[in-house]
Amino acid sequence: MGASILHITNGDSTTNYLKNLRFSGEFITWREMLCEGKTSTDVGSETFWKNRFQFLKSSYNISKKKFIDYTLKEYRTLCNRKNHDEIVLWFEFDLFCQINMIAVLSWLKRHRKGYNISLVCSGKIGKSNKMHTLPELNENQIQNHFDKRILLTEDDIAYADYIWQLYCSDSPLRLETVYKFKNKNPFQYLASAIEMHLKRFPSIENGLNEVENRILKTADNKHPVTKNKLTHHLLKEQSDYGFGDIQYENSINELKKLFSSFNPVELSKKGKQVLENQINYYAHLRNDNSYLGGSKKYSFLYHNKANKLLQITS
């Protein structure tokens, strides 16, 4: 009899793909978006899930029933799966996945200590510059990824947990100083994901973060005819963040006063001035209830030229 495997995947698309390819074992789908909203270090605790539901309800109008059915029931199933020989994590290169990955590893460190835990992570294939999601891999490629999965050491898991603790702290400054100094393996995409995370704090130049500036630039350069077309361009060209359509739609709505029209999509005069760093829009966006991990988004500014964060002290 073969070893029993529990697969923890990054989403339903990966779970369904692996099942269609008849991978043996049980599957848990990690349905969260921990790259957005307030997080705490105690993954899976009552406080943790309470914070997550409050964020998802207020930002995305997620009902309690959907949250329970879609996320909590799957998590409870994970809690009950304790007898497998190996746990295989399936995650991707982007920010969305990498933050979820370190959260899962933090949970495993506490609740599955001593288990064989391995990692499959998609991204670059050969010499191609294109980054691949797991469902984009063909059958041979995904089997090869699985065969070459990396068995994580206790030190690897402890490092992922450490980065998660820093991500959830009330200041990202410590995270900024440590993430670059770890050998890239086995988390070869984690450093770039953390760098992208730090750029999500508002820019000192115009008060918009990297994602928000990308939205304005795409609108200005691509001239999409509808808001849906704008979202389509963002999804196609900004894969490094791993955001879905609802995340971009939410960000676009927060910037709606910088647009004069969405049919076709056109920036307002003020929108163009913000994009060109002639106006700082920080005061219009500031929200003390907006969090990135454990840190208040508007308590820090990203200095683009120095590539570093600054804390607002007053």
Image (cartoon, rainbow, N blue to C red):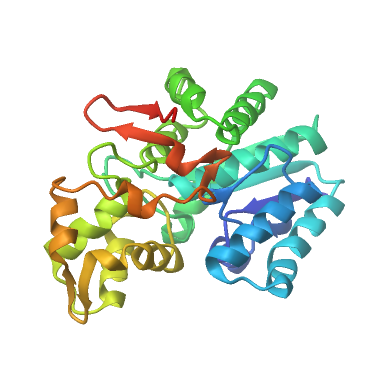
105 w.r.t. 285: above or below = above
Location of the C terminus (image quadrant): top left
State left or right for residue 32 relative to residue 217.
right
- Residue 297 in view of the camera: yes
Q: Nearer the viewer, residue 196 or 131?
A: 196
In percent of width and height, residue 186 lies at: 52, 29
Residue 114 position by quadrant: top right
State left or right for residue 219 relative to residue 228.
left
Q: Residue furthest bottom?
A: 263
- Residue 29 in view of the camera: no
Q: Nearer the viewer, residue 93 or 252?
A: 252
In percent of width and height, residue 97 lies at: 51, 48
Q: Residue at left 58%, top 46%?
A: 100
State left or right for residue 142 relative to residue 44.
left
In percent of width and height, residue 19 lies at: 63, 65
Q: Residue at left 60%, top 30%?
A: 160
